[in-house]
Amino acid sequence: MTIRVVLVDDQAMVRTGLRMVLAAEPDIEVVGEAADGADGVRAVTRLRPDVVLLDVRMPGMDGLEAARRILAEELPTRVVVLTTFDEDEHVAAALRAGVSGFLLKVAPPEDLVAAVRTVAAGQGLLDPAVTLRVIESFAAAPVPDPGRAAALRALTDRETDVLALVARGLSNAEIAARLYLGEATVKTHVSRVLLKLGLRDRVQAVAFAYESGLLTPGGR
């Protein structure tokens, strides 16, 4: 099945580069482009792609507002935010808005392709170079959210352990090794955690773990 992608970036050269990388893949098709947030929202609403790559900083409507509007439409589209090293506050805000992934603009082409495929498959994505700063941003929240803290009671002890390790950035294989479980069992636990907490993917699980107070700087 072909993954349909829309590119939203105010720099034509960036869009051209992204298009060239993605067009070389047999299972990915760039079906539209936009140079600002407002046009991006219109393009996504009209074309209903599987994935939209969305720049944060654009004139007029920026990427964060565009992401919020796209997500509010409850389309099948997954949002991946393109960011740079100096936009930590934007990354945190986008994570709270419910985007599915983050990717640095300087990431190599193979990471871009992998990101599109990962998000299209329904999984969340945090660029390794972004993950630590995102986690630190949520870990610095002064007071846990009472509602989210209460929601943790719906999880079993094992599911709580799995959520904590997901939020620390561990893969299913790494969690399996840490907890002496099979990888398939870990995958099942992750799915149950997301279902019980009403989360879409692992990216939202990171935010939930820190905002609920499950994790704090230096440990649980």
Image: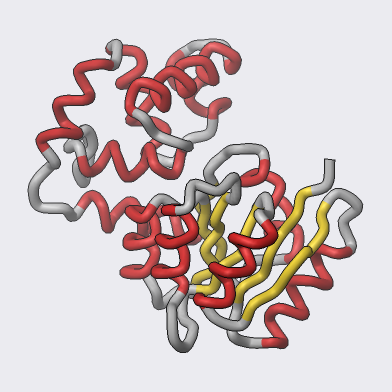
Is 181 rendered above or below residue 96?
above
Rendered-image quadrant of the N terminus: top right
Image point (26%, 52%), residue name: 138
Image point (59%, 45%), residue name: 76
Left or right: 134 with respect to 188? Answer: left
Left or right: 15 with respect to 88? Answer: right
Is 177 rendered above or below residue 80?
above
Q: Which image quadrant is residue 220 in? A: top left
Left or right: 216 with respect to 158? Answer: left
Q: How is the image coloured?
A: secondary structure
Image point (63%, 87%), residue name: 11
Q: Which image quadrant is residue 160 in? A: top left
Q: Which image quadrant is residue 48 in? A: bottom right
Residue 32 spot, x, y in % from top left: 73, 69
Query: In terms of depth relative to the viewer, which is nearer, 120 or 133?
Result: 120
Residue 22 spot, x, y in % from top left: 80, 63
Residue 213 spot, x, y in % from top left: 17, 37
Residue 185 spot, x, y in % from top left: 53, 12
> What count of labels does the image hold?
0
Is 69 rendered above or below residue 142?
below
Image point (41%, 68%), residue name: 64
Query: In terms of depth relative to the viewer, which is nearer, 176 or 24?
Result: 24
